[in-house]
Amino acid sequence: MQQHGPQSGPSESMPASGGLLYVKLILTAVFWGGTFIAGRIIAREATPFSAAFLRFVFASLFLAAFVLRAHGRIPIPSSRQLSLLLLLGLTGVLAYNAFFFSGLKTITASRASLIIAANPAAIALLSSILLGERLTLLRSAGILLSVTGALVVITGGDPAAILRGGVGTGELYLFGCVASWATYSVLGKVVMRELSPLLAVTYACVLGGICLFAPAVHEGIFGQILVYSSSVWLGVLYLGLLGSALGFLWYYEGVRRIGASRTGVFINIVPVSSILLAVLILDEPIYPSLAVGTFLVVGGVYLMNRARDAE
């Protein structure tokens, strides 16, 4: 198979001026904030594996089109690369989305987005343990701040609730999201030493979608899709195109053109946009613990990005 370094990402096919690139990155963060709203709407009617399978059917189709546009063909990975890509699909697609849709059945989109906003902290910790990446004082402070913010949100401002068993099933599912995404991200760093981000994401989505098929059939997806409302189908289309395919495409365009650290700053917008959209679309209230958690999580992600800039 033709090898591609991380530099040869998805932006090969979509050049952008500097100003347009920043618009794309802001929109990407808004799209990702909206995935929690769409997921919450979908979870009212669809079972977790069925919703996830449909999401990645659409995402895979869009991403395959992007690959064809960038490369003129769909490169075939080696058997060793395929095994790593399968692990990406199992962690970042199968496990993450099963936890994602299960959690959104019972907790609000705002709370979910703040818990998952702790992803950078989990990724940094796991990278330090498995890849030997250095944890500076500033990065450690960012991790601590993000985790504290997530705990404030999870416990409603009462951390002792964890000891009393006051954390619900939905929150535990979202913890599963964080663990599976951190694993996916660390594995992705290994995979993208040989493959472009676009190819890695595309194959992860395709293989993860294949893995989701059997559980979706077990849940009765063929009967369910006949009675889904238009809101569910619009949500699935949104997740597939904007939340998955286009979001990843524009994000990695930013990574290629301005670097991972500067692009990563835009992640700060995700929980904020999610909370605002949840208030506007789902009429979700903003509790004091949610506001405090937002400040802590966003501050923690900011510190971790400052730490990367300083390295």
Image (spheres, rainbow, N blue to C red):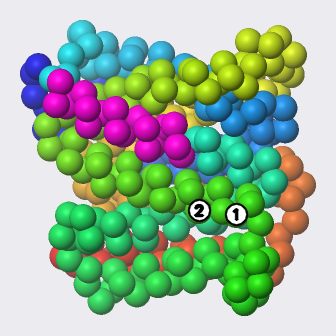
The answer to if 80 sits in the magenta stretch is yes
CA gap, disc 1 and disc 2: 6 Å
Q: Position of residue 299 (x, y in %)?
A: 51, 79
**Which residue does the image show at 87% across and 16% down from the upper left?**
227
Q: In this rendering, is residue 47 above or below 296?
A: above
CB atoms at circles 1 and 2 under 8 Å apart? yes
What element does badge 2 sit on?
helix
Name the quadrant of the C terminus. bottom left
Q: Where is residue 164 in the image (x, y as percent from the top left)?
A: 77, 84
User: Would residue 242 be found to the left or right of residue 184 on screen?
Assistant: right
| Residue in front for this viewpoint, 252 or 204 | 204
Q: In this rendering, is residue 61 above or below 200?
A: above
Q: Can residue 227 be seen in this view?
A: yes
Give the residue at mark 2: 175
The image quadrant that residue 35 belongs to is: top right
The answer to if 115 sits in the magenta stretch is no
Mark 2 surroundings within 10 Å by alpha-carbon count, few (fewer than 14), some (14 through 19), many (20 or more): many
| Residue in front for this viewpoint, 138 or 169 | 169
Q: What stretch is highlighted in magenta?
A: 79-96
User: Would residue 105 be found to the left or right of residue 96 on screen?
Assistant: right
**Which residue does the image show at 61% across and 74% down from the upper left?**
150
Q: In this rendering, is residue 19 above or below 78?
A: below
**Which residue does the image show at 26% across and 13% down from the upper left?**
74
The image quadrant that residue 129 belongs to is: bottom left
Give the residue at mark 1: 171
> From this viewpoint, which residue is outermost toward the left?
2
